[in-house]
Image (tube, rainbow, N blue to C red):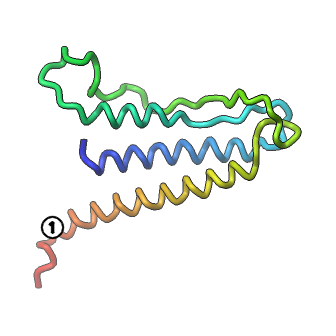
């Protein structure tokens, strides 16, 4: 799998993660709300398995075949019973920290994808010859 596809998967993950974090932050005061998170394991498995080379579709089952789902990420509930805020298990400081980390990850991936396509555009234009 090309590195650009991996970066696109990272951008998709960051987008879903950002929505989940925003939902957690908006429900920080909702009694009984359970914190949600995005299962990173699926992204890791998808990208690890996609790099395997197989000579027949019968080998290794369905490994390496694209998923049919529009959203390959699982949203999981945090079953931690500790009520950090006194109302539910959402810790606003942890959510803000994850939001900052996710923002940096998204900016990195989007910059790399943009650089890749600018490079292609430069080649199409003739490599910058005068």
Q: Could you tell whether 125 is left or right of 26 in the image? A: left
Within 10 Å of disc 1 (Cα), the crowding (few <14, some 14-19, many 20+) is few
Q: Quadrant of residue 50?
A: top left
What residue sits 42% from the left and 27% below the top? 69
Q: Is residue 69 above or below residue 107?
A: above
Q: Is residue 21 above or below residue 130?
A: above
Q: Position of residue 47 (x, y in %)?
A: 34, 37
Residue 23 placement (x, y as % from top left): 68, 42
The quadrant the N terminus occupies is: top left
**Residue tagged by mark 1?**
123
Horizontal side of 124 relative to 72 (left or right) equals: left
Residue 4 position within the rendered picture, expressed as x and y whole percent measured from the top left: 29, 51
Q: Secondary structure at mark 1?
A: helix
* Residue at (43, 60) in percent of width and height: 108
Considering depth in this image, is 76 or 18 the residue closer to the camera?
Answer: 76
Label tally: 1
Q: As drawn, which residue projects farthest toward the bottom?
A: 130
Rendered-image quadrant of the C terminus: bottom left
Toward the viewer: 48 or 126? 48
Residue 70: quadrant of the picture = top left
What's the residue at 36%, 50% (across, down)?
7
Residue 57, quarter of the rendered image: top left
Give how far across and how far down residue 102 sits, in percent.
Answer: 55, 53
At 70% from the left and 49% from the top, the residue drawn is: 94
Q: Nearer the viewer, residue 26 or 86?
A: 86
Does residue 108 lie above or below 10 as drawn? Answer: below
């Amino acid at each position: 799998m090309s590195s650009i596809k991996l970066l696109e998967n990272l951008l998709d993950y960051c987008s879903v993660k950002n929505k989940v974090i925003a939902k957690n932050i908006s429900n920080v005061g909702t009694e009984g709300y359970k914190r949600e998170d995005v299962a990173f394991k699926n992204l890791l498995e998808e990208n690890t398995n996609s790099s395997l080379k197989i000579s027949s579709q019968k080998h290794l089952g369905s490994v390496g075949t694209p998923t049919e789902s529009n959203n390959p990420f699982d949203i999981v509930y945090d079953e931690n019973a500790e009520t950090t805020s006194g109302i539910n298990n959402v810790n606003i400081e942890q959510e803000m920290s994850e939001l900052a980390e996710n923002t940096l990850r998204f900016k990195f991936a989007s910059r790399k994808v943009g650089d890749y396509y600018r490079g292609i555009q430069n080649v199409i234009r003739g490599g910058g010859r005068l």
